[in-house]
Each structure stands twice: as structure tokens, then as C-alpha cells.
Amino acid sequence: MAAVLEKQAKHWTYEDYYKLDDDQRYEIIGGHLLTAPAPTLWHQDWLMDLAILLRQHIRKNHLGCLFIAPVDVVFDDENTVQPDLVFIASANAGILRQRAIFGAPDLLVELVSPSSVRRDRYVKKELYARFGVKE
């Protein structure tokens, strides 16, 4: 389960997040800085299988780009997430930048683990819908 790192009085932004200088995995949701442990080996194995299948299809059909975590998706200054898989259609490539994806991807995939059920199924699902993620 993710832990809130700072007192709720601190309101985190993407620029604050980007300046963090360590190897932790962070996300910002609603201005709150969250961290999570590395995924389980089961999670990583399933993620790799799914990524390989999707990437083959995407490349064969010239559909766009696929990214695997960790990759930052910045919805606005107060909401930066690292989904497990991110697909950007060729027509939406304008949201790709060197350091992150700025805007709503066409597809976000979260592999739900026991420790991430609440955040992935409810908090992030609502966030993705609010910012117009198609799938």
C-alpha cells in the first residue's frame, strides 16, 4: 500500500516531484506525494508477457508507442502517475516529451496487486477517467 510521505500541509507539484533525487518510485495524486515498494516478481512476469504481446501488435500495425513502468504520465501540476503500461497512438504523439508523457494517453494498464487494490481500482481509475484516458 502506498504511503503518504509528507504532511498533508505540503502540496506537491510535478516540478517538486521532478527534483526528487533518489531511486524511489513516486506518484502525485491530488497534490499528495505517494511511494510504493517495487512490484512482486509475479507482477513483473505478467507485465512483461503483456508488454511483449502488445508491443508486437503495435509495431506490426504502426499504431504508436508503448511504454512500461516506470514512466511518468503528467496529467496536470498536481497529478503525476506511473502506470504499468502506457500506449500512445500515433495521432496523439504530441504529448510525448523527453522526460515524461504530458496529457492523457490512449491506454493505461495497471496490474492490480494485493497491496495496490484500493489505489489502482478506485483512486487511479477515477483519476484516469477525470483526465480523459480513453481505455
Image: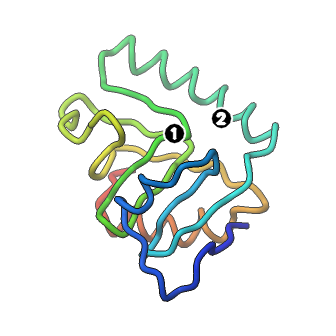
Q: Which mark is residue 93?
A: none
99 or 131: nearer the viewer: 99
Mark 1 and mark 2 in contact (Cβ < 8 Å)?
yes
Q: Is residue 104 left or right of residue 19?
A: left
Position of residue 68 in the picture relative to residue 25 (left or right): left
Mark 1 neighbour class, 10 Å CA radius: few under 14, some 14 to 19, many 20 or more: many
The residue at the point 47 percent across, 81 percent down is: 10
Residue 47, labelled with which disc?
Answer: 2
Residue identified by numbered label 1? 85
Residue at 66% in and 71% down: 118
Give the residue type that dot 2 points to: Leu
* Residue 36 against residue 23 in the figure, above or below: below
Residue 70 in the image: state x and y as whole percent: 55, 40
Query: Quadrant where the N terminus lies?
Result: bottom right
Q: CA distance from mark 2 to mark 1?
A: 8 Å
Q: Could you say where residue 88 lies in the image, as x and y percent from the top left?
A: 32, 36
Q: Position of residue 25 (x, y in %)?
A: 61, 51
Residue projecting furthest to the top: 60
Local SS, label 1: strand
